[in-house]
Every structure is written in C-alpha cells, then in structure tokens.
Amino acid sequence: MSSSGTGGKIGPEGRLAIKLDAQDQPKLEHPAVEKILAEAKVRGIPPANALKSYALELVKRNPEIEGSLPDGPVPDPDIEIDGIPYAELIDLDRFAKSNNMDLAETISRYSWAPRINPIAAQLRSEHAAEIADIAIIDDGKAVRMGFKGEVPDKAVELAKTLPVEVFIYADKGFSEVELEAAKRSAHDEVLKRNEVAAVASSYDAEKGLISIRVRPKEIPKTSADTANLEASIRPTQPSNPVISVSVSIDEELEIRSIDQYLRGGGVNTPKCTNGFNIINSSTDARETLQARHCADELYLIYHNHSDYDGNTTTMARNGRATEFDLARYQGGGLTRTRTFYYDWNLPRYAHDVGTSPVIGQPICKFGKTTGATCDAITALNVDLTSRVGDGQTWRGNIETDRISDRGDSGGPAYYGNRAWGISSADSGTCSLCDTATWFVAVDRVNDPGGFGANWNVWVCSTC
C-alpha cells in the first residue's frame, strides 16, 4: 500500500490519498477454468464449449449440486466453477466477443466484478455524505474510489478485499448524493425552457461534472446560434462550487422508446419484450414487470419462445410507476416463474437483484429485436425526458453503449443470475451508431416512486 500524504492536486479530481498495489491485494485463483481454457486452446475448440462440457459433466456426476430448481430445470447448469457462477461465465464470453477480447483475459479481468457491488452498497449506506465516486477502471484491472473529504477507515478496509489495484481519492469536495441532487435540479430547470424537445442528463463522478445534452425544437442554423442557445438554457450553477455543469446541443438526440412493436424475456405483442416477474411480499401476488412507456396498451399478449411450445396468454395492465419507466401487468393463463430468457430459448434463474452498480462493470440484456448483448456500464442515475409523447421524466437509469434497439423495451438486463434492470430507451437515429442505451434499475421497483416497499423482483435466492 502506498499513500500520497497531503500533497497532490485539490479540486473535482481530488487528491490521491491511498493506492493499494495489486501485488498486495487478494489473489484470484481459477485453476479449473484456466485448465479448461488451456486444453480448449490446444484442442482447437471454442472455450465456451469447453466450459459447458465441463459444467454438464459435473452435474452428470453429481446432480445435487444444482439445488432444488423449484420452477423446473433450465438448459444450462446452475452451478459454480472455481467460485464463478456458470451463468456469469456465459456472459463473460459474450462480453469478451463484444469487446474483441480473449475469454481467458476477460475472466482474469472481470470475474471479480460482482464483488464490488456489496462494497459500493455498504459505502453508499454508511458514508452517503462522503462517498463521491466508485468505478471499475483500466479495463477491469483497477478500482477508483473518491470521497468528499477524508477517506473513512472502513473504505480502506473494504478496498483491501478486492483482488485488483485500488486508487482512493480524498478532498473531492462533493458527494455522490450532492451530485445526484444537482443533476436532477439542473435537468428539471433546463426542461422548463420552451425551446427544449428532449434532455438527457448524467454526471461524471470523477470530475464532478454534470453533462446535459439537449435536442432543441428548432435546430440552430449556425455555430453562433448554437452557442447562444447553449448559453441561454444553461441552468443555475449548483450551490457547491466544485460541481460544474455543461450544456451541449445534440441535434441527433432522440430518446426513443425501444418498443416498435411469463418469464422475463418473453415476446410481447403488439410491442416490447417481457420483463422480470415481481412479487408482493404482503399479499404474495405475482405480476410481470414492463417498461412504463410500453403500458399505453391496456393488454399485452405474452409469447413464450419457440422451444417452450410458443405458449401465449393475455396480461392486463395493473399499475404504473410515477418516477421510473416501470409498469405492472397481472393475469394470464401461464404460471409465473423466477426464470428469465437470457437469450433465445435459453432461460436461467434470477438469484438476486443487483444494487449499487458501478461504472465499468459488465451488464447484459435480452430483447426480441437484438437478442442477447453485453457491454460495460458507462453512467448511473441518468435522468431522461422527451417532450414527444407524454413528456414523462424517467429517473434512475443505468447507461451503457448501444446494445438495444426498438422492440427490446421491457426486456431483462442482467449479469449471470443477477437481475439489474429492464430496457428502457436508447439514443440516436442510427441503429449502427455508437450511442447509448438506458436501463431502468429494477431495485427501484420498491421505491416510493415505483410500486412501494412490498414489491420486488421475484428471485430464487436458495437455488
């Protein structure tokens, strides 16, 4: 471990107070996985195929390692290899292909990533007034943490459990809570301007910068007109002088509902993809999660994938969230389960709900238009408003690079067996452009602006 003492730059980037060197951190050991991948390379077979063969053989020898599977069997073994859930190994393979990486290197860099979420949750709970930033950086090889003032001892203690290099910054001058509040205020202030058609607001917790992208109702004709418009709609500077706000005119910004047209990931008609199933802890009622913008339809017809007999049933809308792009559908003649399709005809169990996501960690999604895709989280707590339609502001969104398209809305966002969100919207007019996709985080289901404390994604924590 090294420390920068009291020197270093002070400002939004803060002061590097502590560096935990990789060689002093816990070591990851994946002997079985490494052996499987090495043998696959020698034999010239796809590494994912080798991992699946190994997993199937383990289950064949000892069926009890899969647990009870109360909603019936699923195609992939619900087990761990070297402490890594097999479901995550599947997603790491897809993530590797999306980023042109070798699978072995991807596992080495990212297999530890889910360990950061309980640490982030604990710091955000116990040190909400101090935590400013937490992210996976350097392509999975390091973590960055930042604090408004001094670094709490607990943060150092938790950081020492991570198997990567950790950079901890002090004296950033703001907290994540302040940054989120300032972003909401700026977003809502810009939205009041009549010239504005759509707004996407996010923040960079490393720099203390709030970025507001605006598509105006009338596109400026000259660069001078653009500069004048940006200046005229710039919101009030946050009360914390360390936090800054940038406004940019984005003519291509189009916050599109991904909805051109009873398991998560089923196909809904006339539009959207089905979300995770949810349960009420008080009444035991079980319903289905859907994107709010898909819920203009009072009824949706659900279709199972073709390998599951193509069963269909009709669901009825039963509620909409006030702050998030979430809606509930009830009824239908099929039994709801704790499984979701992570790809065509491939269901898996949801074991838990993700909380405290961090920038840089992998996430995947399934939708009826683009199928299964994976990428890294690029922003958190993004606010979105488009005056096309009902002008609803959607809070609490996770942002990635473009991995969804129209028709994917409502579909599950996941990593391994963890439910993270449902597809909400994307940005831009070009299906091949490197633009953004937003997912509403499903841990918002039980927020007051969601459906209340009794509702949660239905998971199988004992599977």
Image (cartoon, grey):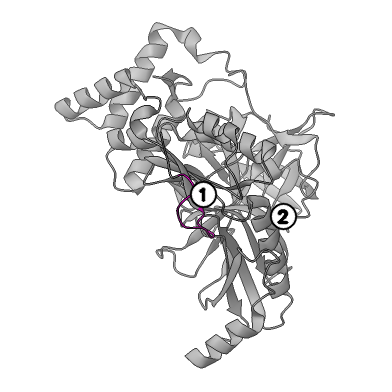
Callout 1 amino acid: Lys
Looking at the rendered image, the quarter that the C terminus falls into is: top right
Q: Position of residue 333 (x, y in %)?
A: 72, 34
Could you say whether the residue bearing mark 1 is in a helix, strand or loop? Answer: loop
Quarter of the picture holding the N terminus: top left
- Magenta-colored stretch includes residue 17: no
For label 1, the residue is 368
For the stretch drawn in magenta, the main secondary structure is loop
What's the amino acid at mark 2?
Ala
Look at mark 2 in the image and give the residue it sits on. Answer: 295
Measuring 31% from the left and 18% from the top, which residue is drawn there?
Answer: 32
x and y percent of residue 278 in the render? Answer: 71, 35
123 displayed left or right of 91: right
Q: Within the magenta stretch, is there residue 12? A: yes
Q: Which residues are magenta?
A: 5-14
Residue 5: x %, y % from top left:
46, 44
Residue 25: quarter of image: top left
Neighbor class of circle 2 (other Cα within 10 Å; few <14, some 14-19, many 20+) is: many
